[in-house]
Image (cartoon, coloured by chain):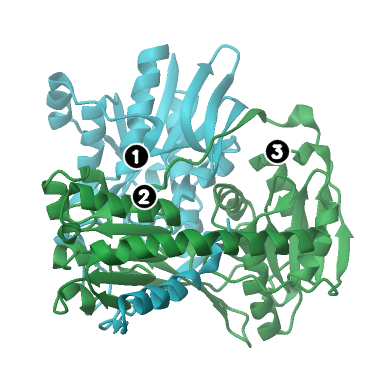
Amino acid sequence: MLHIVACIKQVPDTKVAKINPKTNTIDRASAPAILNPYDAHAVEEAVRLKKRYGGVVSVLTMGPPPAVKAIRKCIELGADEGYMISDRAFAGADTLATSYALAKALEQIAKQRPIDLIICGKMTIDGDTGQVGPGIARRLDIPPLTGVNKVVEINKEKGYAIVHRKLEDGYEVVKSTLPCLFTVEKEINDISFAPLPNMIKAARYYPTVWTANDLENVDRKQLGLKGSPTIVSKIWTPPKPKGGEMLEGTTEEKVEQLLSIVLEKKELFQS
Amino acid sequence: MNLADYQGIWVYIEVKDGKVAPVSLELLGAGRKLADKRGTELGGVLIGSGIKELAPTLFAYGADVVYVYDDPIFAHYRTEPYMRALLHCCQKYKPEVLLYGATPTGKDLASAIATDLPTGLTADTTILDIEEDTGLLLASRPAFGGNIMATILCKKYRPQMATVRPKVMKALPPDPTRTGRIVEERIELREEEMRTKVLEVVRQTVKKARIDEADIVVAGGKGMGSKEGFQLIHELADVLGAAVGASRDVVEAGWIDHHHQVGQTGVTVTPKIYFAIGISGAIQHIVGMQNSELIIAINKDPNAPIFQSCHYGIVGDALEIVPLLIKRFKEEIPKLKASADAKEEIRHA
């Protein structure tokens, strides 16, 4: 019986989100909130491993109350239990403070049922960092395995996992002790259609919700904005092309001008 | 934490197949500027097995000092031993800035060590600057799917860390006469205590670039005339090592599959070079490619809106121009490669 926890996040769909021109921040009202697409693959993989080896899949998120929806989506995908940490004290967290809060919640979950494996998506589409997964692993002092695109074997009895980690030009086969943490690539699986019973369960599902006070041994200085070393000092729109320079001359001359413009970026052609 | 105790700009040097990764040389170029502005040293941290001989390359590319951890336990990159070595180095020598390539390895290592130090880490930086007097690193990166840029600071913790996108910064021209200090370090690590083992490394020939990850995208539209004419887009992309993009009408006409579609209802791309060929430039297409670094448009119609959103434009028939481009790139690109290889030999001579 494996206990796998997938860490997930509800994010604004950045593909359709608009930027508020006054504040230069994302206009959340303009964008539907969705389950971070990478995290859907994390949950899918957890559910597949449960089917293969038997066990329980829990999902954990940090977010405001509406993030319950993202948990419900995970229940549709086949997760068994949902946990959510929600508190103003967590607001404004950067990746360091986020991994701290999630690690505290994971410790609490593990007290109820020891965790064998944690799976995170490669990154979120709103933060785009990919830093939270490895951060959680370090805080729990378990090996982080990033870029996992295939799980070869999980052997709880002997206490190991074998996976493929994606490299720039191939992959490596890595064996790790359990428990450990994977961050998974999108290519690891295709999301299955949710069966009807899951959808019915999801519609009525309500996760366990913890505030900062509910978590044990929490150092409040490490939470939220206070616990975040990085701050965003400025947001600006990159300059856009204001009408191109037209290349003139005969067709051959235009082609030669274009050639020299393109080949000036020679580093693109030398590898 | 006394911030003044932390000095020097460092680059984590990634080694691949016994060579310094190009991104690390780029970061030495960027780091050199930061170090000069601050009047401090540029350091490289070199971790691996049998890698000490790479130090002179790092000096040639701008490093003043190279910290070396050379041990068989570092034969393959693994988070745990590498992190312990780098952590040891940071705690002993206290750099004010530490940069990593935003590669799978660089991101893995940086994310892990940020938690242990602890300190702030900015991901996928594309613009770096430093305040001369305070030493505050200004790390800027595209945010929210690349629509806007954000500048990120880490005021109270050191080192200030950032991963930096490959191919954004420029390496300095190597100066083989430059020298520097080599600091050899050791830490006690026992293989039997390591919790991960690399069983096998499998190299795969690189598949055709994914459109949203490609450095160059060649996109075609209705101006290619027909499915056959659209083949020229594939040919040009092949010559350039580029991914193929398409406008919506071309996809709807069935000339190419949907996952090549660039725009609102397709993929958003931000390559180094974007070719829009025979594409008129509807807004829904523009939003999918407007943040590309260099946009080149070719279109018959001088009034096509695409010319408002490009950097360089050519008015003309794509069916005439593209074959010429293919021919000329086929001649010129191998010459660039040959000159790069020659430089590589000089570097290792």
Can you give x and y, in whole percent of width and height, for residue B227 in the image?
Answer: 19, 47
Please name the residue that numbered disc 1 is placed on: A39
Which residue is pictured at 87% across the width and 63% down the height?
A: B182
* Picture quarter with the C terminus of chain B: bottom right
Q: What residue occupies the far bottom of the structure in this picture?
A: B133
Q: How far apart, in angstroms, are the residues tagged by discs 1 and 3?
A: 28 Å
Q: Is residue A242 left or right of residue B8?
A: left
Image quadrant assignment for residue A237: bottom left
Chain A shown in which color? cyan
Q: For residue A124, which numbered disc appears in the image?
A: 2
Residues at marks 1 and 3, common chain?
no
Decide if residue A80 is in sight here.
yes
Which residue is pictured at 60% across the width and 38% down the height?
A: A141
Q: Amino acid at mark 1?
A: Asp
B315 and B305: which is toward the camera:
B315
Q: According to the colouring, which chain is green?
A: B
Q: Amino acid at mark 2?
A: Thr
Please name the residue that numbered disc 3 is placed on: B76
Query: Contact (CB < 8 A) between labels 2 and 1?
Result: yes
Circle 3 chain: B
Q: Earlier in the sequence, mark 2 or mark 1?
A: 1
